[in-house]
Amino acid sequence: MESKKRVIGRQNDGIKHLSSMDGWIIMPPDIDRIKYVNKCLQTGTILFKSRDNQVETYVIVNKGDIHNLRFPSDETDAGSVVTVVKDPIYGICKVVAIHQENEGGQEIFEENQFRISKGRGDKLAEIDLKGNTGEIQVFSNTGSNTRLSSNLKFLNALKRAQLNLEVQGNMNIVIDDTISFDVQKKIEFLINDSDSDSDKTASFSYEYGRGFEVVDEFENEIKTTDKGIRIKTKNGEELFLDESGFTFRTSKEDLKKILNDLMQELLSAIITTPSGPGSFGPTTIGKITQIQQRLNNLFGNGS
């Protein structure tokens, strides 16, 4: 009885082999670059041109690798250098290697280092993870304008993020020019001694529309409002300054009241003269009255 054989596949005859070629990512002419690159990222494919000018229109790229590619700026430019293999039977092309490019004098890749680098023209964003030194290096250049800038953004899906930075030890920031903060609502600093058993905290806060407030660990306060500036010590001494004048008082005394009492005593003072008891003359009384009014103007209408 003859056995029936079922064909389950075809053995390679040894004549046709996978071929590899080096080349560049290219861009088709007369297209919207942004839409085309987004399509490449979504489909995981690129347009490829080899060193001998062979063009492959549908080259597969691993989804984990495609974000490491640099796409050309236009049809006259060349993107990342890659190695592509082609299956001679099915005609499928796939990227198997992405060649590292040296970006305009940046540090050459070193052992035990992982780099994420993206650039276009004179713009570059780069993150280096250096295992040999335990460093994370971030480099950003937004262009070759007269004033270069580096931008870092931390965003979540709602375009708002909370960034928490914890340093166990000292944190040193060295700036050789100007530091600027552009805060939309409120900025706050809290300072305490983690090595102490005390729970006292010093704070500095500023909220737009409400002013700033500083409170030290001794409970002294400085506060600004739409009315003016107030300084208060932990013992109750207080200085308040606004457009109508200023007030200085303690828990027991008020400077304005003291000076007014002094002016009043001068106005009603009895002076002993050779002719007997008397008082200041009209001219002196007038000047004392003027001084009293000036003091009232200085201290305002408050008590």
Image (cartoon, rainbow, N blue to C red):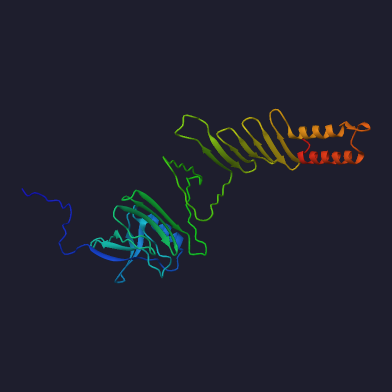
In the rendered image, which quarter contains the C terminus?
A: top right
Q: Which of 80/11 is in front? A: 80
Residue 5, visible in the rendered structure: yes
Q: Residue furthest right?
A: 275
Against 82, is 174 above or below? Answer: above
**Residue 208 x/y as whole percent:** 62, 44
Q: Which of 245/268 is in front? A: 268
Q: Residue furthest top?
A: 252
**Residue 281 x/y as whole percent:** 91, 38
Q: Which of the 4 image quadrants contains residue 231? A: top right
Residue at coordinates 82% horizontally, 38% vertically from top-left? 292
| Residue 187 as seen in the image, left or right of residue 102 | right
Residue at coordinates 29% horizontally, 52% vertically from top-left? 112
| Residue 165 as seen in the image, left or right of residue 55 | right
Residue at coordinates 47% horizontally, 49% vertically from top-left? 173
Q: Which of the 4 image quadrants contains residue 264? A: top right
Q: Which of 297/131 is in front? A: 297
**Residue 235 x/y as whole percent:** 63, 30
| Residue 272 as seen in the image, left or right of residue 168 | right
